[in-house]
Amino acid sequence: MKRIIMMLLTSHLFILCASAQTESEQFLIEFQVFRIESILSGDASLDEEFWAGAKPMEADLKKAITLFTTGRFKLGESLLEMDTKGWRWNGTPLPFSGTDVISSPTARLNLPGNQILGFGEPVSPRIVVVSGETSSFNYEDARGIEYLERRSDGLFDLKQSAESTGFGIKTSARREKDGRLSLSDLTFSLRSVEKRKSIPGVTLQIGEPLLQTRKYTLDLQVSSGKEYGVLLHPGDGPGLLLIRLRARILPAASIAKSEVK
């Protein structure tokens, strides 16, 4: 009887330990975000279906989002390629170069405006997500937005709006029984100037900026360590966003926590 009780206690302790290990499991999710303002041509394809939504992607979202694992794009005379060997820019490997490790539930970074999402100088954050929890980060252009305002004498004054443009990502993560990683409610938010206030008698778009925030929410299921691509084309918004992502399981406490202010 003592042996049976001891076995039951041991089994119960094992279950508790396994449960605690699962709850504290951490995932490293790496992003690389490019803003593409030139004409992008080429094609993309999937060698793995990683859309994990309960229903097929809605028409509006499908129009704005392209998911891919391999691709070949031309930007002018330059070539961007993605396949099982990684991403390459004109034949040169394009590594994940992020150094920002974000482990707080929410974080914000202010960077110079023109370098927030410029191609060749991508934002490359690495975010640590605890299983079952949600983490997010936002990039903001802290410089403000310039515009012209007509004076009573007909001349114009240069003004600066206090509002800021930016880009944000929010996600939660967990490991499935088959070993793949679920990124639930993965939300990309884009705050940008889509219109400006009109100035009577002036056709140029130089008036006070009118900002709009667009959000795109996805449910993805990815293989640990594999690279994926998301092409975000917000319709009448500015340009395209090319997002590269990779997620993997981390041993407990393998990355020291750091606060990003």
Image: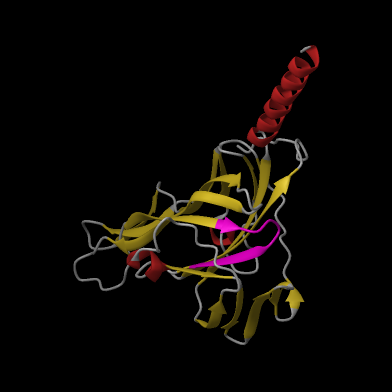
Residue 91 at x, y percent in the picture: 74, 81
> In the figure, residue 133 lies in which quadrant?
top right
The N terminus lies in which quarter of the figure?
A: top right
In the depicted view, which residue is nearer to us: 158 or 103? 103
- Image coordinates of residue 256 in percent, x first then y, are 75, 36
Q: Left or right of 197: which side holds 92? A: right
- The residue lying toward the viewer, choosing from 97 and 20, is 20
Q: Which residues are magenta?
A: 221-231
How many numbered discs? 0
Where residue 8 sits, quadrant-wise, is top right
Q: Position of residue 75 (x, y in %)?
A: 57, 82
Q: Main secondary structure of the magenta part?
A: strand
Q: Residue at x 65, y 69 (%)?
A: 120
Q: Work out whether 7 lies above or below 227.
A: above
Outermost residue toward the left in this view: 200
Q: Is residue 161 magenta?
A: no
24 up-or-down from 48: above or below: above
Assign the C terminus to one quadrant of the image. Answer: top right
Q: Residue furthest front?
A: 1
Residue 101 visible to the viewer: no
Is 227 magenta? The answer is: yes
Residue ID at (75%, 37%): 252
Residue most extreme to the top: 2
**Can you say whether 75 is above or below 101 in the image?**
below
